[in-house]
């Protein structure tokens, strides 16, 4: 819309722009087209737009034949969008974006997000929509220029800080351009900027303990002008000069001088996360069984997997009191289905070990807990289960889990309906054995 049209429309629908809602309407049509071009929209995309306002970007997105979910907090603007843009591929959600659950987007194949984010909720909104696991493959956000500079900052710059690293540890952030205040009505007091955010591949950075890294960064930047050696004096750092030498930074460095890789090196000096020794695992003997799950002999893990011999396994589903299932992302070091999402815990039945004994052992080894387990059902060995006879167990936790970083890359609690949608849309994200277990569990539950 042109500036004159925006003024007339706002008067017609009786909307006086509210500063706290970030109601500054874009009237530069060339800029609107340029912004949409940065998303590289295709008809296969499901685009979530936060704060569509009067539809400056929404209309252009619809012209690309994408399905658009527009989340608008102001009821009057939401109703206006429904009347003005009544295409079938547009869904207008009259809601606060902070109340929206991004996990429902797992039921969509290709998700991108665009938004003119209100300045006063930008940090909260960013952390909510960038949380992992995320179904979103691209974020294009118009932010307060200061915030955009913080997200995309490099070491030794004034904008570089804990938020920078918290976002960049899992994402690439590109500062695209400054957006002058003059292209909005009403004109804000400060300029905005457009940033593009893309997810990092899990293997792109060295393995590390996320909790240790986050703690170090938070402490390091709590008084950014002090030397890190003093700020991190409470950490169990045996030899600070050695840690600095390994990380490649000056022992007198301050927090803002360390790159992301140097922060990771420091975290790994405190809590090493190298490749686990898999020799014992590869040499373990497993029972080879017949089609009726009767033990024929024992064989090494590599022989069992290499020859697709029938063997035994357990899968364990751990639920929260809210009814959400804990999914683990398999370690990058796994010989099968690495980085795929899987049951809460799972593992092979070893020689001379029962299914029940294995379930208790795997739960302790992978999640660090001992809780009561209920035996649910048994799956027959097939190509879909990697030739494993699987007993499926169920348990509930109220005190939290303690994932083993050598076994688990990441984890998250998710509602069963979200998992259903995710599997239906993106089955390649999961270990095939889990898909079979989950489908069988859901059939039994219903």
Image (cartoon, rainbow, N blue to C red):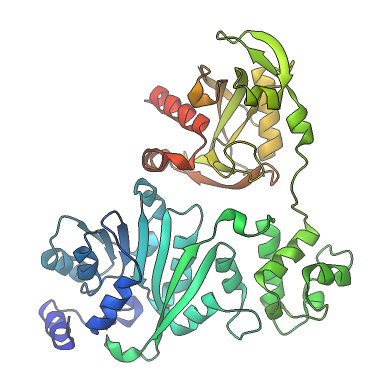
Compared to residue 23, the image places residue 302 above or below, namely above
Q: Picture quarter containing residue 204? A: bottom right
Instruction: Between residue 255 and residue 280, name the one nearer to us.
Output: 280
**Residue closest to the eye, 207 or 129:** 207
Q: Where is residue 249 in the image (x, y as percent from the top left)?
A: 78, 75
Q: Quadrant of the N terminus?
A: bottom left
Q: Which residue lies furthest to the front in this view?
A: 307
| Residue that appears at 26% across and 60% down | 68
Residue 80 vs residue 138, the one in the foreground: 138
Q: Where is residue 324 in the image (x, y as percent from the top left)?
A: 48, 41
Is residue 320 in view from this perspective? no
**Residue lying at 15% horizontally and 69% vertically, measured from the top left:** 80
Q: Can residue 83 be seen in this view?
A: yes
Left or right of 221? Residue 318 is left
Left or right side of 217 for 102:
left
Numbered label tally:
0
The quadrant of the image that shows the C terminus is: top left
Q: Position of residue 288 (x, y in %)?
A: 66, 15
Q: Where is residue 40 in the image (x, y as percent from the top left)?
A: 33, 65
Q: Horizontal placement of 164 versus 247: left or right?
A: left
Q: Which residue is drawn at 41% across and 63% down?
A: 138
Q: Which residue is drawn at 41% across and 51% down?
A: 103
Q: In the image, is 413 to the left or to the right of 21?
A: right
Q: In which quarter of the image is residue 220?
A: bottom right
């Amino acid at each position: 819309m042109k500036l004159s049209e925006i003024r007339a429309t706002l008067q017609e629908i009786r909307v006086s722009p509210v500063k706290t809602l970030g109601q500054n309407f874009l009237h530069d049509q060339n800029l609107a087209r340029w912004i949409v071009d940065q998303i590289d929209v295709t008809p296969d995309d499901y685009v979530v737009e936060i704060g569509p306002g009067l539809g400056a970007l929404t209309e252009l997105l619809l012209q690309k034949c994408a399905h658009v979910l527009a989340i608008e907090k102001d009821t009057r603007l939401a109703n206006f969008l429904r009347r003005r843009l009544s295409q079938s591929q547009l869904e207008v959600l009259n809601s606060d974006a902070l109340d929206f659950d991004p996990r429902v987007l797992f039921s969509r194949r290709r998700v991108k997000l665009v938004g003119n984010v209100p300045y006063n909720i930008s940090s909260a909104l960013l952390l909510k929509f960038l949380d992992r696991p995320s179904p979103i493959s691209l974020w294009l956000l118009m932010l307060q220029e200061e915030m955009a500079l913080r997200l995309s900052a490099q070491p030794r710059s004034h904008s570089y800080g804990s938020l920078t690293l918290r976002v960049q540890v899992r994402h690439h952030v590109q500062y695209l351009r400054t957006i002058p205040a003059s292209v909005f009505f009403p004109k804000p007091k400060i300029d905005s900027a457009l940033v593009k955010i893309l997810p990092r591949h899990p293997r792109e950075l060295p393995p590390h303990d996320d909790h240790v890294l986050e703690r170090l960064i938070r402490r390091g930047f709590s008084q950014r002008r002090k030397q890190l050696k003093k700020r991190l004096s409470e950490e169990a750092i045996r030899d600070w000069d050695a840690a600095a030498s390994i990380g490649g930074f000056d022992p007198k460095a301050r927090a803002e001088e360390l790159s992301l890789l140097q922060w990771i090196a420091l975290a790994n000096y405190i809590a090493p996360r190298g490749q686990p020794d898999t020799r014992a695992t590869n040499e373990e003997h497993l029972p080879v069984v017949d089609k009726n799950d009767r033990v024929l002999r024992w064989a090494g893990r590599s022989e069992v997997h290499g020859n697709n011999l029938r063997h035994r396994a357990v899968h364990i589903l751990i639920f929260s009191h809210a009814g959400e299932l804990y999914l683990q992302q398999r370690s990058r070091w796994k010989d099968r289905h690495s980085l795929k999402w899987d049951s809460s815990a799972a593992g092979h039945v070893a020689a001379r070990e029962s299914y029940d004994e294995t379930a208790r052992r795997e739960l302790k080894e992978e999640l660090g807990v001992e809780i009561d387990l209920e035996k649910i059902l048994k799956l027959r060995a097939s190509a879909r289960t990697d030739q494993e006879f699987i007993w499926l167990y169920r348990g509930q936790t109220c005190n939290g889990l303690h994932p083993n970083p050598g076994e688990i890359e990441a984890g998250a609690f998710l509602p069963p309906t979200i998992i259903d949608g995710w599997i239906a849309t993106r089955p390649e994200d999961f270990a095939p054995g889990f898909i079979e277990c989950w489908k069988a569990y859901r059939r039994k539950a219903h």
